[in-house]
Amino acid sequence: MKWFGAGGILFPGLVWVVSAIGAFFTTGEKALESSGLISLGLFLAFLGYFNRISAKARHKASEKRKARNEFLPSALKEVVSLAVEVLPEADRELSLEDLRDIQWTIDQGLRAVDDWTNFTVIDQFQDSALRYQLYEIMYCLGTYQGIYTPNLNSYVSEAFRNTIEKSLTPKVLNFWKWETLWGKFSTDFDPVVKDNIMVTGFLLQGVMLYTANT
């Protein structure tokens, strides 16, 4: 942690020095003569214990990798078997039901940045978080604009930009402050610096779609 000194050395060194001084004053004139052997025994016991745990974890991970490697080829075959032929260009129009869904999505994107009507607000740490709802709106708008209305910007692009801006508000990103505090013991709350793929990866895909379309 950066407040412990350069390279994190100061704090561990201080603990070592204080512990040594404390041990000197509390030991008295005579220490346990077999303490060296006891320390060695404890060290070997801990080493063996944690090595065993590590070995179990490696074996479990290896089995999981093997299962996944066996699953992927069959899953890909299933995906290929379910694929359908591309429709003729004349038959690629959206249905009325699809258009209603797109209309709803555009309306949601055009809402004010502080308007959360029709959004599900439960908690911001799991799959129900607002950020995922906003990212899905981006993906729908990007797909619609890029494939079906490539020449239409106007209100679709406005809804897209508004959704991107909305995804950067404190109500959406405030969860990272708590994740950083209890997960990293840090006060650097910047959500894109490190280890926040659940924002950077998803958001970047939405921004990429907007950039490609416009």
Image: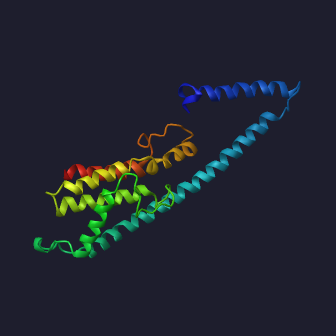
- x, y percent for residue 97: 26, 75
- x, y percent for residue 158: 25, 53
Q: State left or right for residue 81 relative to residue 152.
A: right
Q: Is residue 180 shown above or below 76?
A: above
* Residue 209 shows in this picture: no
Query: Is 10 or 116 nearer to us in this picture?
Result: 116
- Colour convention of the picture: rainbow
- x, y percent for residue 213: 20, 53
Q: Is residue 142 shown above or below 81?
A: above
Q: Residue at x 69, y 29 (%)?
A: 15
Query: Is 109 or 167 nearer to us in this picture?
Result: 109
Figure disc tally: 0
Q: State left or right for residue 126 relative to residue 203.
A: right
Q: Is residue 18 shown above or below 71?
A: above
Quarter holding the N terminus? top right
Quarter-wise, where is residue 12 in the image? top right
Query: Is 214 or 62 nearer to us in this picture?
Result: 214
Query: Is 162 or 193 nearer to us in this picture?
Result: 162
Quarter-wise, where is residue 69 in the image? bottom left
Q: Residue at x 62, y 49 (%)?
A: 51
Q: Is residue 140 shown above or below 32?
A: below
- x, y percent for residue 121: 47, 60
* Residue 47 shows in this picture: yes
